Amino acid sequence: EVQLVESGGGLIQPGGSLGLSCAASGFPFSSYAMSWVRQAPGKGLEWVSTISGSGGSTYYTNSVKGRFTISRDNSKNTLYLQMNSLRAEDSAVYYCAKRRLRLGELSLDFWGQGTLVTVSS
Amino acid sequence: EIVLTQSPGTLSLSPGERATLSCRASQSISSSYLAWYQQKPGQAPRLLIHGASSRATGVPDRFSGSGSGTDFTLTISRLEPEDFAVYYCQQETFGQGTKVEIK
């Protein structure tokens, strides 16, 4: 059974840093690209970042480029998101999600339960 | 960056009715890259359709997807009570969502 469990969310002051983790199980982790998707309270889904299975390729939405870093440790089956210079508009539930296919599609077939990040003074 | 625009923003329908949701891309995209998700309050999104028209595992056949190029459609043939939710299309980025509410 595929499981994705996020952790690391919390309350952080503007300008601060926070690291999120996503522990994966139930599938060959290193074979699949993984993504972070966020959802501000009462708002829609926003793609944040994607990393290839090997970790060699990373992609970011424009609003987080230079501030957020996605990474993975395939030996630990864990995905990470390091968030620096946080802003109020980064407040959201952050979901990690697994790509459905190894190649050729962008759909996300399994999602974690999400972890809440609140940026406020 | 490709922008996905969904319409309508809200769809008010009764159980048993047909729902037609639209997703328009700012430029032509491969059908392989278009997916649809359902999200209910307090829950993570659920993949419904991948590759524009293929149902994900366990998705009832009242859900169908179609389209190509810049115009894609999600159709729910007969709404069941559990189908009232928010629906998103996705390429890498997401559309803004369509809420299907009970009339």
Image (cartoon, coloured by chain):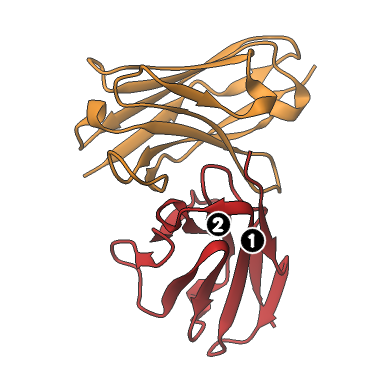
Chain colours: A orange, B red
| Near-viewer residue (A66 or A18) | A66
Task: Estimate the spatial distance between the alpha carbons at disc 1 and disc 2, rounded to whole Å.
Answer: 9 Å
Residue B76 to residue B96: above or below: below
Classed neighbour count for the residue bearing mark 1: other residues with Cα under 10 Å, few (<14), some (14–19), many (≥20): many
Q: Residue at x 56, y 86 (%)?
A: B18
Marker count (numbered): 2
| Near-viewer residue (B95 or A78) | B95
Residue B13 to residue B7: above or below: below
Q: Return the chain for callout 2.
A: B
- Which quarter of the rendered picture does the N terminus of chain B lie within? top right
- Which quarter of the rendered picture does the C terminus of chain B lie within? bottom right
What amino acid type should be assigned to the residue bearing mark 2? Answer: Cys
In the orientation shown, which residue stands out farthest toward the right? A121
Classed neighbour count for the residue bearing mark 2: other residues with Cα under 10 Å, few (<14), some (14–19), many (≥20): many
Q: Which residue is mark 1?
A: B24
Q: Residue at x 41, y 21 (%)?
A: A57
Is B24 on the left or on the right of A111, as rendered?
right
Q: Residue B9 falls in which quadrant of the image?
A: bottom right
Q: Residue at x 53, y 90 (%)?
A: B16
Judged by depth in the image, the label closer to the viewer, 1 or 2, is 1
Q: Which residue is mark 2?
A: B89
Q: Position of residue A111 (x, y in %)?
A: 41, 43
| Near-viewer residue (B98 or B14) | B98
Q: Position of residue B81 (x, y in %)?
A: 52, 79
Residue A49 to residue B12: above or below: above
Marks 1 and 2 on same chain: yes
What amino acid type should be assigned to the residue bearing mark 1? Answer: Arg
Q: Position of residue A69 (x, y in %)?
A: 52, 15
Q: Return the chain for callout 1.
A: B
